[in-house]
Amino acid sequence: MTLASPLTAGRIAVTGSSGKLGGYTVADLAEAGYDVVALDVAPAPPAVREASVAALAVDLTDLGQVVDALEGCDGVVHLANIPAPGLRPEGVTFTTNVAMNQAVFSAARTLGLRRVVWASSETTLGLPLDTPPWYAPIDEAHFPRPESTYALSKVVTEQMAATYARWTGVSHVGLRFSNVMTIQDYRDLFPPAWDDPAARRWNLWSYIDARDAATACRAGLVASEESLGGAGSAPNVIIAAADTCMRRDSAELLAEEFPGVELRREVRGTQSLFDISAAERVLGWRPEHSWRDEGDALI
């Protein structure tokens, strides 16, 4: 297969543009010079309106609507889904997410889009950790371990993405996002966990700043086919912050909350218990933001 050139310019559709990450991604891509079209069933939020991009209301479970919406696009950043377990009945979460994802991948195939970047999830790796992880830091090999129908929808979609990538020769880049956080989320959610580590042990105290999650989406568009693994590749990489949300040492927290879990390499200070080295190797991406940057504003 001929290697396609990275999408450093062109028309990019962002699905789920009204969600938390969607607005940041639309703004980031627009600022980087892309011609962005924002797709969501919900009205465009302020971040999308301020970016002055085209916005279209689309039912992403309807293949015909998705084909129409993606017409003329060079690539898609697919972020739309029911975003977590427990928000809708389990069967609805699974069938809705899988239907959306299949429609977007199928439309991309029909229209000959050159790159698909999509939101997988850290939950494919065993979250929430009601039972201990197999080892830490958790990496891409800690898979598949879905613990909810939401996570199962993402595991199924990772296989779906690999199949569409093989059929089309177009790379489908899956981003296993950690818990996406804004500055306000830091203020609301992190301080209570400092006195109760069990409150956020469910994902090893991990998170990703929404601004960094957005740049990871752009990195998925611009990464070379060679770094992704060749034409028709479907890599799935962990996207997490470099640190935890805690003020205590990560190795100490792991030993306290998950005694006996193997620590496969040294983790220094508050370093993340998720291994993000694959994202740097495959996408050339590293996180730039931390809740610690907010300093006294969090206390």
Image (cartoon, rainbow, N blue to C red):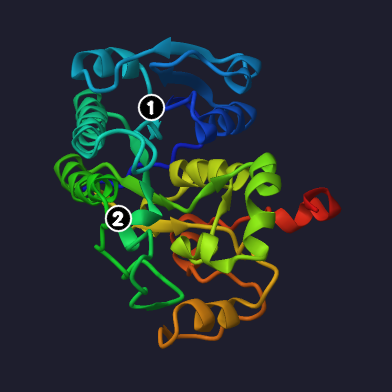
Q: Is residue 279 left or right of residue 1?
A: right
Q: Which residue is mark 1?
A: 74
Residue 290 in view of the camera: no
Residue 274 x %, y %: 48, 68
Q: Is residue 203 left or right of residue 188?
A: left
277 lies above or below 67: below
Residue 224 x %, y %: 42, 51
The residue at 25%/17% (across/down) is 67
Between 81 and 92, the one nearer to me in the picture: 92
The residue at 62%/49% (across/down) is 189
Between 222 and 155, the one nearer to me in the picture: 155
Q: Is residue 291 left or right of residue 133?
A: right
Q: Quadrant of residue 82?
A: top left
Residue 286 x %, y %: 58, 58
Residue 239 x %, y %: 48, 55
Secondary structure at badge 2 equals loop
Mark 2 or mark 1: whose residue is earlier in sequence: 1
Secondary structure at badge 1 equals loop
Residue with the most extreme right position: 296
168 lies above or below 41: below
Q: Amino acid at mark 1?
A: Asp
Residue density around tag 1, few if under 14, some if 14–19, many if 20 or more, within 10 Å: many
Count of all numbered marks drawn on residues in the image = 2
Q: Which residue is mark 2?
A: 230
Q: Is residue 65 left or right of residue 139?
A: left
200 lies above or below 189: below
Between 62 and 235, the one nearer to me in the picture: 62
225 lies above or below 70: below
Q: Amino acid at mark 2?
A: Gly
Residue 37 in view of the camera: yes
